[in-house]
Image (cartoon, rainbow, N blue to C red):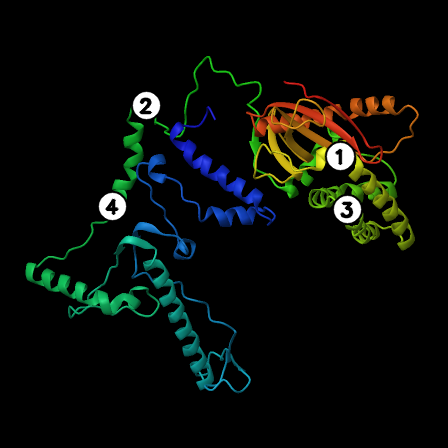
Amino acid sequence: PACIAPEEHPAIDQFLDLLGELETEPTPISGAHIEERMQKLFANIPALHENPVAILTIHKAKGLEWDVVFLPGLQKKSQRADTKLLLWSEEWSMDDTAEPRIYLAPIQHATEKEYPTKKWLSKRLRDRDIEEMRRLFYVACTRARDQLHLFAEVKAGKDGKLTTPDASQLLSIAWPFAEPFFAAITVQNESSGTLLKMPAPSVEDRLNVLPSLAAQEENASIPLSNFRRLPADWHPETFLSDVMIPGNTMQSQTAETTDAAHLLRPQGSLHARAFGTVLHALLQPLATILRAENDAKALHAAITQLQRPAELRLRQSGATPGEAKISAGKIMYALESIAQDQTAQWILATQPSIDSALPEFEIPLTAMLQNQAHSVRLDRMFLGGAELGTNGTSHLWIVDFKTAAHSANGLDDFLMEQQKIYRPTMQRYADAVRAAYPQAPTIHLALYYPLLLRCTWWAADRN
């Protein structure tokens, strides 16, 4: 940023805002997509350049607008097309009831005359070219918001009459409108005895430019408005400040792959991972049920309704029908147990949020941490009290669900070991949240084990 002039910052901000918008859209970002959207992005050009002028072909200017448009050289002829070996055209009948016909006309021998079909097809294709030129001229003229300036040169014959432009010139399209202006100039020239014309620069004038430049002082410098000299004592910061980047779930999945060296993922067999993934996914529906049902029978009935979706998810993960049914039964038993656990009820209950725009579960965040982009997805985040299970807004709780299982023997040692393993990952979650929400209160990190009905937690470090 220090190398860029301050007046250019708004244009850069606009471009970065555009990238932020693209990241939140479901369409994958590509170079073509960015280029397409940039065509609709207008920077404050006068602030960047004293005399902004865009020189474009008519095709390139399509879809754009300017306050003032100049169209020079309307009398120029389009490049003559080479004689084609074969002319062809698909033609429909006037009533459009019959199938279209294809007319072919090969090139004739040099000693032959042009036969009727060839002559007709040539005229037919020329008429199409003229219609295309009309469309092109319309596009060019409608690029202007306030002013349109047309330039053309018309020659007069020996008799003094103006030469009518032919169909290969854009001027031919505007001729019914432009002819009176040229006729008036011709009459004025005849009465004054002079011919008004723009003097063309001579070759000598152009060649004398280099000697005139060489005659300048040897130490003459050319000002470069787009370069800035940094102060002699300037030094780059070791790290830029941590900031949030707008993101979505798709980005989080991509970035998690990049952060694989930093963020640990649970290991195990394919079946075990599928079991954990499905149980994890059903915790949010369980939260909805717990908030709606107070009666034990109604609660049990509602949880039972989740068995079929659990089986289908397990089948999609590669489990056989029998394996899926057994695993789904275990998941139902786990959900029934979780529903009775007070800590789980507190975690899954409706709690205050640090940002009402965020989802309650599976919260995606992307942030710049020490000059690197990191994307995370939080299982659960809410405001609560200072201790586990207490309500309030004094602390921000980040909870990660872990589906590991363990026997009752040595359970406390197991939980301490798990805390040690996942502490770096959870700390990165806290850093991303602080970058996104600098005003966040003290952050507590927690690992909840649905199969063990246990939770271990600790206060996040402040870097």
Query: Circle 2: is it few (<14), some (14-19), or many (20+) Cα within 10 Å?
Result: few
The structure residue drawn at horizontal position 86% and vertical position 22%, both measured from the top left corner, is 412
- As helix, strand or loop, the secondary structure at mark 4 comes to loop
In this view of the protein, can residue 372 be seen by the observer?
no
The residue wearing badge 4 is 202
Instruction: Identify the amino acid type marked 3.
Output: Leu
**Labels 2 and 3: the sequence-earlier one:** 2
- As helix, strand or loop, the secondary structure at mark 2 comes to loop
Compared across the picture, whether 214 is left or right of 22 comes to: left
Foreground tag (4 vs 2): 2
Q: Quarter-wise, where is residue 433 in the image? A: top right
Foreground tag (1 vs 2): 1
Label 4, label 1: how many angstroms apart (C-alpha)?
A: 89 Å
Q: Quarter-wise, where is residue 116 in the image? A: bottom left
Circles 4, 1 touching at the beta carbon (< 8 Å): no
The structure residue drawn at horizontal position 48% and vertical position 39%, both measured from the top left corner, is 15
Label 4, label 2: how many angstroms apart (C-alpha)?
A: 28 Å
Label 4, label 3: how many angstroms apart (C-alpha)?
A: 95 Å
- As helix, strand or loop, the secondary structure at mark 1 comes to helix
Query: Circle 1: is it few (<14), some (14-19), or many (20+) Cα within 10 Å?
Result: many
Q: Nearer the viewer, residue 28 or 99?
A: 28
Q: Is residue 12 above or below residue 330?
A: above
The percent position of residue 84, horizontal first and vertical second, equals 49, 72
Instruction: Identify the amino acid type marked 4.
Output: Ser
Q: Quarter-wise, where is residue 275 in the image? A: top right
The residue wearing badge 2 is 220
The residue wearing badge 1 is 344
Instruction: Identify the amino acid type marked 2.
Output: Ala
The residue wearing badge 3 is 299
